[in-house]
Image: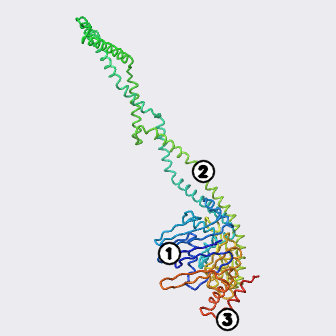
Amino acid sequence: MLTELAIRDFAIVDHLELELAGGMTAITGETGAGKSILLGALGLCLGERADTGSVRHGAERADLSARFDIRQLPEARAWLEARELPADDCLLRRVVTAAGRSRAWINGQPATIADLKALGERLVEIHGQHAHQALLREETHLRLLDDFAGHCEAVGEMAETFRAWQAARRRLRRLAEDGDELAARRQLVRYQVEELDQLALAEGELKGLEEEQEELAHAEERLREAQFAAECCDNDEGGAVTLLTQAINRLSTLPGSDRGSLAESLAMLGEARIQVEEAARELNHFAAGTELDPERLAWVEERLGEVHRLARKHHVMPEELTERHRALQAELAGLEAGDQDLEALSAEVDTLRERWKEQARRVGEARRQAARRFGKAVQEQLAFLAMGKARFEVEIEARETPAAEGLEALRFLISANPGQPPRPLARVASGGELSRISLAIQVVAARHSTIPSLVFDEVDVGVSGATAEIVGQLLRRLGEQGQVMTVTHLPQVAAQAHQHLHIEKQAGRDTTLTRMALLDEAGRVGELARMLGGVNLSDRTLAHAREMLDASQRPHH
C-alpha cells in the first residue's frame, strides 16, 4: 500500500510530505483547493504523462516521490526482482523540469516512464470520477468480468494464441499467393545450379588453370629460346665456350702470363668458361624436359572460357563463381523446401486454430459462470444503494467472427424499474442512477482486485442523503480489506473514513499555495460541519457533524 507521498514545487504546492495508512482515507477540501493535485502527483509517480504546467510557477522543477509497502504484493516484488532491483522496498520518484523534460527512478535506479507505468499497475488501481462514462462503452465490460473471474492469465494466453494463429494464416496466404512466382524462380535456380554443377569448378582451381594456361601457351617459345641460348654457349662452330678456350690458350703462352694483370685475366676467363659450360648444361636440361601439349592447352583454354562465360552470366568475377554456386544451392534448397513449408504451415494454422478454439471454449465457460456471480454481486450492491427494485444482468452473445477476446461479446444491462426490460447502461436516463450503478460495479470489481490500494476520485457524484451514507459504508468496507483513498464532496462519505486528509488553498500577496494535512478528531468535526453547512458554522451544524462522525465510526452490521 501507499505509505508516503512527497511533493515539491508541483502545481501550487511548494513542499508537502504525507504519511498514509491502510483503511479508508477521505480527501476533502473546497472546490478548487487542489484535491486533484494530490491525485495528479500520485499519477505522475505511477507513469502518467507530464507537462510543463506540472511545475510550480517560478520553480525549476517538480520533484515527486511515492513509497509503497509491497510485502503483501508478490507480483510487484517479482517485477522488481526480475530487473535486479531491491524488492524489500518500493520508492518511485519522478522529476519534471520547467522545460518539460521528465526523468524517473525506481528504488534509486534510473527507469523509463514505461517502467513506472508497468510497476504502478501492480501497486494502485484508480477509479476515476468518469468511470461511469467508461462503463457506457461495452468493450470495458468484458475486461471487468475477466478481472472479476480471475482468469486474466488464461485470457492472455488465448489472445496470444489468436495472434499467432492469425499471423500463421497471413504467412500461409502469402505463400499460396506467391506459388506461381516461386515455382518459376525455383525452375530458374535449379537450371543455374545444374549448369554450375556441370562446370564443377573446385575451390582454387581457377588460379591453377590460369597458371597452367600461361605455362602451356609459352612452352614452344621457351623451348626455342632455350635451345638457341644453349647453342650460343657451347657449339663446335664458335660458341662462347670455344671462344673462351681459344682466348685462354693464347694468353697462357705469353711470357709473364703467370703474374700481374695477365694472371688475373686468365683466372677470370677460366671462371667464365666454367660458368658458361654450367649454363649450357642447365639450358640443355631444361630443353630436354620441356614437352609441347597443344591438346592440353586447348582444353585448359576452353575450360577457362567456360568459367568466364558463366561468371559474366551471373554478373560476378570469375573468382567469385564458387561462392555464387554455393548461394544458389542454398536458395534452391530453401525453394524446394517451400512445398514442405506450405504443408507444415497449413498444419500449424490448423493446430493453432484448434488450440484457440479450445482455450476460447474454456474461457467462455468460465465467463458464463462468472457472469452469474458478477450479476448477483452487483445486484446485492444495488440493493444496498437503495436500488433494490433494479435488475442487473450480464448478457453474453456469441461473436460472429473469432477474435482475440474469445467467442463472446458481453454487455451489462439494467432495468431500473419493475416491468421494464433490461436495457444497455448507455440508455439509462438518470444520472444519479447511472452513478450508483457505476459505483456498484466498481465496488464489486475492486473487491476481487489483487491490488490492495484503491483510489476513488469523486465516484460518489450524483448521490446524496441516505444513499451517500451507504456509499461511505461501502468504501469503508473496502478499506478494511486494504487501502482506499477517496476524493469526496459528501460529508456522509467522509465521515465513514478511518482517516481524513484535508486540502486547502492559501492565497498570499504574491503566491497561492495548497496545504494538506491529516485531521485530528476536532479537525474532522470542523471539516464535516463545513461540508454540511458552509462557511458559518453554527453549534447545531457542529453537533450534527459530531453525531455523524461518532455514528460512522461505530461498527456496522
**SS at badge 1:** loop
Disc 2 versus disc 3: distance between alpha carbons? Answer: 83 Å
Q: Residue 555 appears at what percent x and percent y?
A: 75, 82
**Which corner quadrant of the image does residue 65 belong to?**
bottom right
In this view, the residue in front, 549 or 338, is 549
Give the residue at x 70% y 64%. 362
Above or below 502: residue 140: above
Residue carrying label 2 = 344
Give the amino acid type for the residue marked by disc 3 in the picture: Arg
Disc marking residue 55: 1
Above or below 22: residue 431: below
Residue carrying label 3 = 540
**SS at badge 2:** helix
What is the crowding at mark 1: few (fewer than 14 residues within 10 Å), some, or many (at least 20)?
many
Give the residue at x 60% y 53%. 346
Above or below 164: residue 144: below
What is the crowding at mark 2: few (fewer than 14 residues within 10 Å), some, or many (at least 20)?
few
Give the amino acid type for the residue marked by disc 1 in the picture: Val
**SS at badge 3:** helix
Disc 3 versus disc 1: distance between alpha carbons? Answer: 42 Å
Q: Considering only order in the chain, which callout, 1 or 3, is on the residue closer to the N terminus?
A: 1
Question: As drawn, which residue projects farthest toward the right?
Answer: 557
